[in-house]
Image: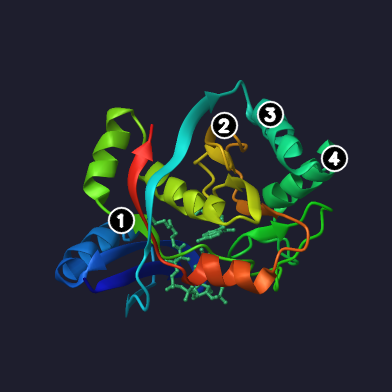
Amino acid sequence: MKLFSVKLRASKDGKHISGAERITPYEKIKTVIDQLYDRLSRKEFDSINIKIDILKEQPLLVEKTLPVVNMNFKNHREANKWAIQIIQKQTGLSEEKIKQLIDLIHFGASPDRENMRGAMIVDLRGNRLEKNRSRGVRTTDVDYLDREKIIRKLKEKCFTERTADALALTTKNMLYPDIIAEYCISDEPDYLTGYVSTKEAYYRLTPLKEKGNEKGGRIYFVKNGADIDKIYRFLEEKPVLIKDVDI
Ligand code: COA
Ligand code: AMP
């Protein structure tokens, strides 16, 4: 069956506000555009860009997302301490180095101290490897085979659609052998839940950032010597469809 990637992104005054994407058969393109438009247009925008492309290769079919582990903390400092420990175990980086990297995300990781447009890539020596420190790398072309079923399942356990998107994105990341962990906080000032992922689980941590902070971002921790071009190719081009959620 021919599948299409449908991507919408909204901006205001030249600044990206939000984006979303789906992988869908031809017959559902119109419905999907409607759904994504409804979601994006809730925020004030002056431009919405819609992109539809046929998938050039068959998607990789994945049985399940990472298992979801939900954790609540007294405050963002406690949550970050826990996040640092788990990243330390996975990467062998010092707690101090991990804290420095996480601080960059909380204060603006691009050279102009703004949010990056994608994720930071860091190896196990603590070196940043993105080709461009303002852009980083963006994980795209990932969705669920039957999104309605997944959203139903997540909602039954009181998770949101946002969790579905983050979980799909990070599940794709963790499929790549050289990516061993991820740290993420949203750039929305009121959305305080973030996550750390490893090959074993998606740890959903609340609150991982301070209320009111407009900074956010992602760090992908990769093995030393990882081929950066191949990482970009996989994350930005390889289509992935996930069959079920592990909750
Ligand atoms: N933040 C800031 N700017 C962004 C951006 C982001 N997340 N995504 C796109 N842009 C802007 C940038 O200026 C970008 O130029 P750049 O490549 O120099 O950074 C420009 O838009 C074009 O980017 P492109 O990658 O061609 O956008 P797109 O039309 O293909 O849309 C999104 C990409 C927004 C759909 C994608 O980045 C995204 O975030 N998808 C959602 C991921 C997700 O939730 N997946 C799970 C689905 S289940
Ligand atoms: P969001 O999860 O959309 O709130 O995004 C949080 C941060 O993650 C953004 O500020 C970007 O730095 C980064 N980011 C956004 N989209 C992507 C993506 N598709 N892949 C990797 N990083 C992203």
Query: Which element is circle 1 on?
Result: helix
Q: Earlier in the sequence, mark 1 or mark 4?
A: 1
Q: Which residue shows up at 67% across the image and 59% down it?
A: 120
Whole-angstrom CA distance, mark 4 to mark 3, is: 14 Å
Crowd rating for badge 4 (residues with CA inside 10 Å; few <14, some 14–19, many 20+): some
Residue type, label 2: Pro
Which residue is denoted by mark 2 in the rendering?
207
Whole-angstrom CA distance, mark 1 to mark 4, is: 40 Å
Crowd rating for badge 1 (residues with CA inside 10 Å; few <14, some 14–19, many 20+): some
Q: Earlier in the sequence, mark 4 or mark 2?
A: 4
Residue type, label 4: Ser
Q: Quadrant of the C terminus?
A: top left
Residue type, label 1: Arg
Label 3 residue near ligand 2, CB within 8 Å = no
Whole-angstrom CA distance, mark 1 to mark 2, is: 24 Å
Query: Which element is circle 3 on?
Result: helix
Q: Which residue shows up at 28% across the image and 43% down it?
A: 150
Q: Quadrant of residue 110?
A: bottom right
Quick check: 239 left or right of 114?
Answer: left
Which residue is denoted by mark 3 in the rendering?
82
Whole-angstrom CA distance, mark 4 to mark 2, is: 23 Å
Residue mark closest to the camera, 3 vs 1: 3
- Residue 210, above or below 72: below
Please say whether residue 43 is visible from this viewpoint: no
Residue type, label 3: Trp
Q: Earlier in the sequence, mark 1 or mark 2?
A: 1
Which residue is denoted by mark 1 in the rendering?
39
Which residue is denoted by mark 4 in the rendering?
94
- Residue 185, above or below 159: below
